[in-house]
Amino acid sequence: MNFCRENDRLSHFLCRFAYMKILTGREIKEADLRTIENGPVLSLDLMERAAVALTDRIVAVPEYECRHASSGRYVDYVVFAGRGNNGGDGLAIARLLCTRSHVRGKVSVVTVGYDGQLSADCRANYDRLPSGVAVYGFGSDGKDLPPCLFGDDVIIIDALLGTGVNGDVREPVRSAIAFINSVSGKCHRVFSIDMPSGMPTEPEDFHDSACRMTGAGQEGSTVLADVTFTIEFPKLSMLLPRTGKCAGRTEVVHIGLDKDFIMASDTPYMAVDADMIRQMLMPRDEFAHKGTYGHVLVIAGSSGMMGAAVLCTGAALKSGCGLVTAHIPWQERTVMHVAQPSAIVSGCHGPAFSSLPDDMSKYSAYAAGPGLGQRQETSAALKSLLQSMNHAAESDAGVACGRTIVLDADALNIIASHPELLPMIPPGAVLTPHEGELARLVVSALPGCYPWKNDMQKMRAVCCLSKKLDSVIVVKGAHTMTCAPDGRCYFNMTGNPGMAKGGSGDVLTGLIAGLAARGYSPLQAALLGVWYHGCAGDRAAEENGQESMNASDILACIRIGLNRGGRV
């Protein structure tokens, strides 16, 4: 099908960019070695490069300024350093913090496991510690540490363990992790270096460790970080719900690892960042007109649920497409005329979606589901919609008609409860389920794949569903995952917890459909839509706060394209 070939071309294009890839722990170690060999650079110098970049990031963020806002005192830093290379990073950071003129607080180091052999680079950085850094050894339970080390003006820097954790964390590191979690509530913040200590890098380790991480605060298996400064690219475990909650906010710090090696690495996991989005954006033609950029049909809303239709339609209007028609219950047309005067209104009789517009051929993309309800007549009308799209494809000599449909909310629930509709989903569709809708779809389409025991099983089920339906699946949540039929999974790096509000998904549905009408492929539309939806959520949080923001704030903050500075 055309969609399959387009998806293959896009995946090949995206794989050319090293900065997007998410590597395993073994591959990360190999990337370090290749960087040292091909740089050429000494491993100690590479560690210093990483420490400089990490220190710059630690002291640069306004919300973590060296002077604590509430007390006016300077922030102190306490670095917990293990005996491997992650500990070496922490020791180098402690030294560099002492050299920064605007860091006026005290810098202390707590060494863990230093009665054993240290890695060579860790030992070198331990020997480089200046006299101004107070060094304490961690005992069996941390009770021998001065209580004055920990208070609300203290930032704890976790540098105990990095990538490559396998199996259970051993003593004394396990006790140190439990101690950090026990005192973190008294402190200003906890920063983890590269990974929260105790978090496994490898997907194979998730089955045994994920549940343990859920209760990490009590069991002491993983540091609960406020921010994780991860080196070069995020690690997969940071992006999945059950394990990622330990990482807090993830910030990527680039140190220039060997790009040739990273580009040659074959991984199905990628992180969506600004560079990738910039490469996908299409320019607008100065001589174009509204017909050039497509026409979206939004099928949404029912009596008492018109807010969903308004949000979905509004997002489609903000996508850059030329025209948007809202197909809603005719009795509710005044709501749409007032809320979204730029939209064309099409109506059907009754309180819910029950029939299609007369001419479906004029639309280049469709969004269906938000606020529809699950009445019998709505189920029948959705079946007619899917049949009409398949008929259009068949009439074009069996080649996909090039029209994308985005299915969300009640459209997905109807399909899940009527499995005979699954084969009718046209190739190249975009499905945007939340966790509950995804579970219902998997139960219907892939018997035996639910319930999943961990996030890796869930991810595999999503990949199987995407391949079976030959469609893009967007699993909404923190670091929203977009799965393509070829098995590649893309994790989004924008957005915030304040977006977990009713109506946020309706905005995303309309935005993706509008981008598809604008001329982007289904996968491109999904990736761009999720990215800019998250950017809008971040703007809304800045303006209104995460607690107070709502879906209409996200809609108001959508900005597609590059700004004057060339930023996405």
Image (cartoon, rainbow, N blue to C red):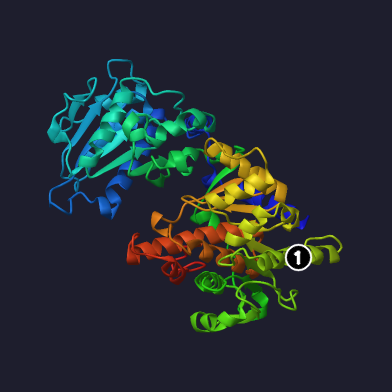
Q: Is residue 280 visible?
A: no
Displayed quadrant of residue 169: top left
Residue 491 makes an appearance in the image: yes
Question: In this orientation, which residue lies closer to the viewer: 329 or 359?
Answer: 329
Q: Position of residue 458 (x, y in %)?
A: 57, 41
**In the rendering, at what x and y percent does residue 567 appear?**
46, 63
User: Residue farthest to the right?
Assistant: 397
In the rendered image, the vertical position of residue 450 relative to residue 116, given as above or below: below
Please name the residue shown 76% across and 57% down the image: 2
* Nearest the eye: 402 or 130: 402
Neighbours of disc 1 within 10 Å: few (<14), some (14-19), many (20+): many
Left or right of 1 on screen, residue 325: left
Q: Identify whether 19 is placed above or below 140.
A: below
Work out whether residue 520 or residue 352 is closer to the camera in this orientation and state it: 352
Which residue is more in the foreground, 156 or 416? Answer: 416
The percent coordinates of residue 434 (x first, y second) are 53, 53
Give the quadrant of residue 513. Answer: bottom right
Quarter of the picture containing the N terminus is bottom right
- The residue depicted at 58 percent of the width and 82 percent of the height is 331
Q: Looking at the image, how many numbered discs can be counted on the residues? A: 1
Residue 122 placement (x, y as % from top left)? 33, 25
Which image quadrant is residue 264 in?
Answer: top right
Label 1: which secondary element:
helix
Above or below, 249 relative to 340: above
Residue at 36 percent of width and 62 percent of height: 541
Residue 215 vs residue 350: left or right?
left
Q: Which residue is mark 1?
A: 389
Q: Amino acid at mark 1?
A: Met
Judge from the rendering whether residue 242 lies leftward or rightward of residue 229; answer left or right.
right
Looking at the image, residue 212 sits to the left or right of residue 109; the answer is right
In the depicted structure, whether residue 430 falls above or below residue 565? above
